[in-house]
Image: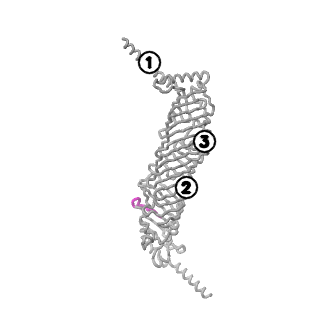
Amino acid sequence: MKRWMKILAAGLALAMIAIAAIPFLVDANTFRPMLETKMSTALGRTVKLGNLHFALVSGSLVANNLSIADDPAFSTTPFLSARELRIDVDMKSLIFHREIHVRGFEIEASQIHLVQGGNGRWNFSSLSRSAASLTEDSGDGDALFHSAVGLIAIRDGRAVVETLPAQGTLHVYDHLRLTVRQFSLGRQFPFEMGATVPGDGVVSVKGNLGPIDPHNAAKTAFDVQVGIQHLDPMAAGFLDPNAGVSVLADIAAHAASDGNTVRSSGTLAMQRLQLVRTGSPSPQRIELAYNIIHKLDDNTGQLQQAAIRLGAGTIHLSGIYRLIPEDPWVDLKVAGESVPIDELGSLMTAAGVKLPNGSQLKGGTLTMALGVTGPANALVIAGSLELDKTKLVGFDLGSKISGVAALGGVKTGSTTSIQSLKLNFQASTAGIVVDAIDSVIDGMGESTGSGTVSPTGVLSFGLVAHVTNARGMGKVGVGLLTKMHQFGRPDSAKEPAEGVPMLVSGTANNPVITADVTGLMHRNASTLLSKAKSLFGRKSSSAVGEK
């Protein structure tokens, strides 16, 4: 027994000595031309390796540098470069038969350059053209992989994404890590990926890829779960800083693609949301649940349904969009039925809605039906709004009505109660146009009219107020102004003129309301002159007839 133990120990010692001696007896660099040729043929790109050495403990060949050329239609710089490449190979076949059977790759400190052309095609799309030569399934005896690859990994990589022609800031993903297990061209395989983006955002993707599309690798099918934390689209380069839109977002989504269409659903939790340049970051968190269908060929999609839940109310969004980098565009519908106003403060802040003198809406509901169309930096928002039974706290209507307050006796105190307010509007970079105003305000009665708000917030509105609470001499004054308004109406007017004509000027923050006395006098003078001309004209005709 002792003799056999000595023989076994001696055999193991000799084996270990032989293995340890391999790096001294075999120069790993002798395999470099063959390995470069096989990898270049497999990928359809020129592959260059640096100095090779053996890592016998892990059974690997290690290259100090790696460079994979880009598709010449996109760039002359490398598609991928790395500080180190570890190739897991069958050492016995390599050393004794000079055959390379790759079982895995590990890439350290890589730089990946991803480019999308103007036609939507990516620079990695053509990698699949030569993919058949990767495996023995192609019938090629020099196939690089002779079975499913156990592991393909990228450690501490960096990916730079750009478009051609160049459009603004590059998208950079640092600390990229990718793990692919049991890789096979013809079957689905699992993978995990993670990275960071500027602004401290963190992206993680986990799911299945494959089979690889033989004509366009970018159209490979997938089914994944996506998680993004603390995404700042402006810092990451996804949003134009001049668009006035900003947000910090957390995203949890599921996405599946057949290679042509991506279907995705998930939730978007937004902090510090700002929707327009004149808005301010929302102080509260806003959550949105969505369901979209996106077409990869033209980068367009349909927002089938999205919902912003606000307490007991919900705002619904739907429509279509286009995500072409140089010309992003949307055509969306926004609708909400009896949404509690107390829940809308965050959205109003984000949308740049400024109420007079820093006042706040309290209580009541809002119903809306809006359209949002146009490019991201020049959106047009148009539609109708309806407020019901709300209060404007911190705004004294009576103090803003110059000259008419004494006549009408409008005294509302620090809170203005709005029984109802309906209007249509259109907001754009040129300002806001409002029409079909119909409101009922305590102490003021019913008011109708239209007007504009300039981009700088200057008001110019014409209203007719049906003052209901006038008393004493104030009632006489209101009646007099109403009669003047009636008298100043042309004979062709289809409806009687009721109420006091009023002008609203100043700014959205500090409005000024006055009776349109000048307008009344001008219109009355014009009407008197017109009626006088008509009267004298008839008398002149009668005199001629009598002669």
Left or right placement of residue 399 versus residue 42 in this view:
right
Q: The N terminus is located in which quarter?
A: bottom right
> Could you tell me how far apart the alpha carbons at marks 2 and 3 are, in whole angstroms?
28 Å
Q: Where is residue 110 in the image (x, y as percent from the top left)?
A: 49, 63
The one of 96 and 537 positioned closer to us in this rendering: 537
Residue marked by disc 1: 532
| Residue appearing at x 48%, y 40% in the figure | 428
Q: Position of residue 309 (x, y in %)?
A: 58, 47
> Could you tell me how far apart the alpha carbons at marks 1 and 3 are, in whole angstroms?
56 Å
Tell me the element at label 3. Answer: strand
For marks 1 and 2 on the same chain, the one whose residue lies earlier in the sequence: 2
What amino acid type should be assigned to the residue bearing mark 1? Ala
Q: What stretch is highlighted in magenta?
A: 72-81
* Magenta stretch holds residue 76: yes
What amino acid type should be assigned to the residue bearing mark 2? Ala
Residue marked by disc 3: 340
Residue marked by disc 2: 253
Badge 1 local density, few (<14 within 10 Å), some, or many (20+)?
A: few
- Confirm or deny contact between disc 1 and disc 2 (CB under 8 A): no
Tell me the element at label 1. Answer: helix
What amino acid type should be assigned to the residue bearing mark 3? Pro
- Confirm or deny contact between disc 2 and disc 3 (CB under 8 A): no
